[in-house]
């Protein structure tokens, strides 16, 4: 039976929403809805597809596990599918799973409905009990493969069939052994343990406290932070506080373990951490008792949990039940409802972070929630405040996202005081009184771009057909509800100056290596620098510098010389260092090479800036606004007066006699080079019109491989991409 059009439309809408939320959760680590809300959407789609099988498509979220490999890492196939676990939220749903499981063994097994004991099996491997329960940790799934006792591979879940190889990053996590223990047992020839890598509560709370102080978006839960840190391209930047618990088998020798309990005991003896709160039970009644007890005690643990996973303990029973395309049939997760409380919203304060972002923060009557007393919660942006219709004096519902981060869910209008005032957002920075810049939902901005293109196409078509253009209804106007952020654009704002100065002096910007973070704080504390221009006037304050602690003649000389050496770095480095919203290293280079000087950039209109390839309207607008703002003009005039080079060699055009074999080529660098550092060569190639990226793909034109080239070289060979060694590179570089 074919589905009616309205049902087909709803199924398509659900697929689109679920794909988006999957990507936000697994790939971008920025979830927008709760797990329960996601499961509700998924169940609705599953019901529609069950009723109308013609709706099932190969890429439906019901046909996959979820999550895509992170771009930039090599992917590898799992030894067996690394599936997700079905969720349940009530005892009735849990009992339904239990009864389905029992029915699967009805030919040889029975269930005692009174005692709730789990069907003994005549042919099953003997074990003390049939269910094993483990805390469901809010972390990231990870598969560890050991061969002859040595860690050889660590894979993320990815899409369930293959995942990202993050072995080098995982090797920095002290909780994961690089070599299995041999004191209590002999490691098998191969062993794959699957488990959860996570961030402990204390470390998570401290990192979020620092982010809040800096005005940065908070991580919604420890899983987000863990996912983000594992995506670091530099293994040295992986958070050292990560922990790991093994909780499942991948590929293991047949004789290694007959039950899950035995497996956990074996890997524990080999040195892999396992959760001490694991419990083996023989009935659903016992299982429910454990779940009820654990819900009360879980807040005392040093990691976030959102439920309990129940599994058949016997591996023969597990294998007999098997799995669907998405989830094993032999296990299920019981998820706890997030704890909520009611309190009063006393005030909304605006904080300015080091990036210039203004963030509203709720101050509330203290209320106990999930083991702590909650007084404050981030409200993220003014658009969210308006969408939730919050008023000062409101009774509000507060919840802990991931059982750690407090968030205001919604007000209770029925308890609202008659005179409760609406909150207002500042038009000027609370710290420096600069007019703020407002950013709106990028999706809504794209709607207007699509509308404009439709209008232009219709106009062109109407002219050809000698008729009046048909009216195309515009999207709803962008309003206050679409606001996603407010920023102070002043680079000299006291709330953000020191951090911006550290960025400006950084290696990839002005590269003033003698002007590190400690020195910047020392100079600022002494009142020697208040603006970026003050850096280049420090040579006039030699005596004041020498009076500072640990500032001898040689160090002062090096500082002054290092600042002088930075002056000729060029316009691209200056633009990248000014922390202009949305203008990073690549876009700064594109702007600088296209226009050649700051004067030309300033004279360019918005259309000229947007016309550059790879420059979007938001980036163009941000640069244009900065260059024409009072704060922007002030800092640039200071740099100009100091003698900083604000020009850049123009990139050769396709028809230019300076055109090179690197023009419009996408190039990847790998390995160690003799004549260049990676950054030096990247800058050189970009000046010749190339685009240098960090990962090999089908769009890559050329790979330049130095000594000890690794996975990028192998992938380039697989894709048939042109490969040069350093000698070939030198032969083709001009001059």
Image: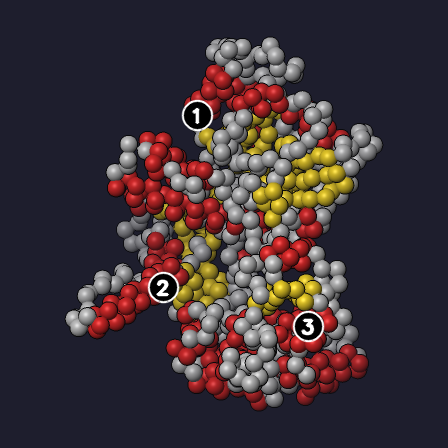
Residue that badge 2 annotates? 445
Element type where label 1 sits in the image: helix
Q: Residue 230 placed where, x, y %? A: 62, 50
Which numbered mark, 1 or 3, is in the foreground of this view? 3
Q: Is residue 476 above or below residue 490?
A: above
Element type where label 2 sits in the image: helix
Label 2: few (<14), some (14–19) or many (≥20) C-alpha neighbours in 10 Å: some
Name the residue at 62% across, 23% down. 315
The quarter of the rendered structure image containing the C terminus is: bottom right
Label 1: few (<14), some (14–19) or many (≥20) C-alpha neighbours in 10 Å: few
Q: Are marks 2 and 1 in contact (CB under 8 Å)?
A: no
In the figure, residue 62 lies in which quadrant? Answer: top left
Residue 7's disc is: none
Name the residue at 63% across, 28% down. 278
Earlier residue among tags 2 and 1: 1
Q: Is residue 183 left or right of residue 621?
A: right
Which numbered mark, 3 or 2, is in the foreground of this view? 3
Q: Residue 91 placed where, x, y %? A: 45, 24
Residue 93's disc is: 1
Q: Nearer the viewer, residue 252 or 717?
A: 717
Residue that badge 3 annotates? 729
Earlier residue among tags 3 and 2: 2
Q: Nearer the viewer, residue 676 or 345?
A: 676
Q: Is residue 149 above or below residue 284?
A: below
Which numbered mark, 2 or 1, is in the foreground of this view? 2
């Amino acid at each position: 039976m074919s589905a009616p059009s309205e049902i087909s439309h709803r199924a398509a809408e659900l697929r689109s929403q679920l794909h988006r939320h999957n990507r936000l959760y697994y790939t971008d680590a920025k979830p927008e809805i709760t797990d329960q809300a996601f499961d509700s959407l998924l169940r609705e789609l599953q019901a529609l597809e069950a009723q109308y099988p013609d709706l099932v498509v190969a890429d439906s979220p019901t046909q996959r596990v979820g999550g895509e490999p992170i771009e930039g890492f090599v992917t590898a196939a799992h030894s067996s599918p690394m599936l997700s676990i079905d969720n349940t939220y009530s005892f009735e749903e849990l009992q339904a799973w239990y009864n389905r499981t029992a029915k699967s063994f009805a030919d040889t097994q029975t269930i005692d409905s009174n005692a709730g004991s789990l069907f003994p099996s005549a042919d099953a491997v003997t074990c003390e009990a049939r269910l094993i329960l483990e805390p469901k940790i809010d972390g990231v799934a990870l598969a560890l493969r050991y061969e002859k006792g040595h860690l050889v591979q660590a894979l993320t879940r990815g899409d369930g069939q293959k995942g990202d190889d993050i072995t080098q990053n995982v090797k920095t996590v002290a909780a994961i052994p690089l070599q299995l223990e041999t004191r209590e047992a002999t490691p098998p020839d191969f062993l794959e343990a699957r488990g959860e890598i996570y961030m402990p509560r204390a470390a998570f709370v401290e990192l979020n406290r620092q982010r809040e102080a800096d005005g940065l978006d908070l991580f919604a839960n420890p899983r987000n932070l863990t996912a983000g840190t594992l995506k670091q391209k530099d293994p040295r930047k992986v958070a050292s506080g990560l922990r790991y618990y093994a909780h499942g088998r991948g590929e293991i020798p047949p004789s290694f373990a007959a039950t899950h309990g035995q497996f956990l005991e074996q890997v524990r003896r080999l040195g892999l951490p396992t959760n001490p709160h694991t419990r083996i039970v023989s009935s659903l009644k016992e299982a429910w008792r454990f779940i009820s007890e654990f819900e009360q005690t879980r807040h005392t643990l040093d990691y976030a949990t959102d439920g309990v996973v129940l599994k058949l303990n016997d591996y023969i029973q597990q294998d007999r039940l098997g799995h669907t395309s998405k989830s094993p049939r032999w296990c299920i997760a019981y998820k706890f409802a997030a704890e909520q409380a009611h309190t009063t919203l006393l005030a909304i304060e605006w904080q300015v972070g080091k990036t210039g972002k203004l963030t509203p923060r709720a101050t509330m009557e203290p209320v106990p929630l999930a083991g702590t007393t909650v007084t404050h919660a981030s409200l993220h942006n003014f658009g969210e405040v308006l969408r939730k219709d919050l008023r000062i004096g409101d009774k509000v519902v507060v919840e802990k996202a991931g059982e750690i981060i407090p968030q205001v869910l919604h007000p209770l209008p029925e308890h609202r005081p008659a005179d409760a005032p609406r909150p207002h957002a500042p038009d000027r920075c609370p710290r420096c009184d600069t007019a703020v810049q407002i950013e709106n939902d990028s999706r809504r901005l794209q709607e207007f771009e699509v509308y404009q293109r439709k209008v232009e196409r219709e106009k062109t078509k109407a002219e050809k057909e000698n008729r009046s253009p048909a009216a195309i209804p515009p999207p709803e106007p962008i309003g206050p509800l679409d606001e996603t952020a407010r920023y102070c654009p002043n680079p000299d704002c006291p709330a953000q100056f020191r951090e911006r100065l550290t960025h400006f002096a950084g290696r990839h910007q002005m590269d003033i290596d003698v002007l590190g973070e400690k020195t910047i704080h020392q100079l600022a504390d002494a009142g020697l620098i208040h603006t970026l221009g003050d850096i280049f006037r420090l040579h006039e304050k030699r005596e004041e510098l020498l009076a500072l602690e640990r500032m001898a003649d040689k160090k002062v000389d090096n500082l002054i010389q290092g600042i002088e050496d930075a002056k000729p770095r060029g316009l691209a480095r200056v633009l990248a260092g000014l922390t202009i919203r949305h203008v990073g290293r690549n876009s700064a280079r594109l702007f600088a090479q296209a226009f050649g000087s700051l004067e030309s950039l300033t004279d360019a209109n918005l259309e000229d800036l947007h016309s550059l390839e790879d420059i979007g309207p938001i980036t163009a607008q941000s640069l244009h606004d900065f260059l024409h703002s009072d704060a922007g003009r002030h800092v640039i005039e200071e740099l100009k007066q100091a003698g900083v080079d604000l020009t850049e060699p123009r990139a050769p055009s396709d028809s230019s006699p300076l055109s090179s074999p690197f023009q419009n080529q996408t190039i990847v660098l790998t390995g160690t080079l003799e004549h260049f550092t990676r950054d030096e060569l990247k800058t050189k190639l970009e000046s010749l019109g190339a685009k240098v990226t960090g990962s090999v793909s089908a769009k890559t034109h050329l790979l330049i491989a130095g000594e000890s080239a690794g996975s990028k070289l192998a992938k380039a060979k697989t894709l048939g991409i042109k490969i040069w060694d350093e000698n070939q590179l030198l032969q083709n570089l001009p001059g």
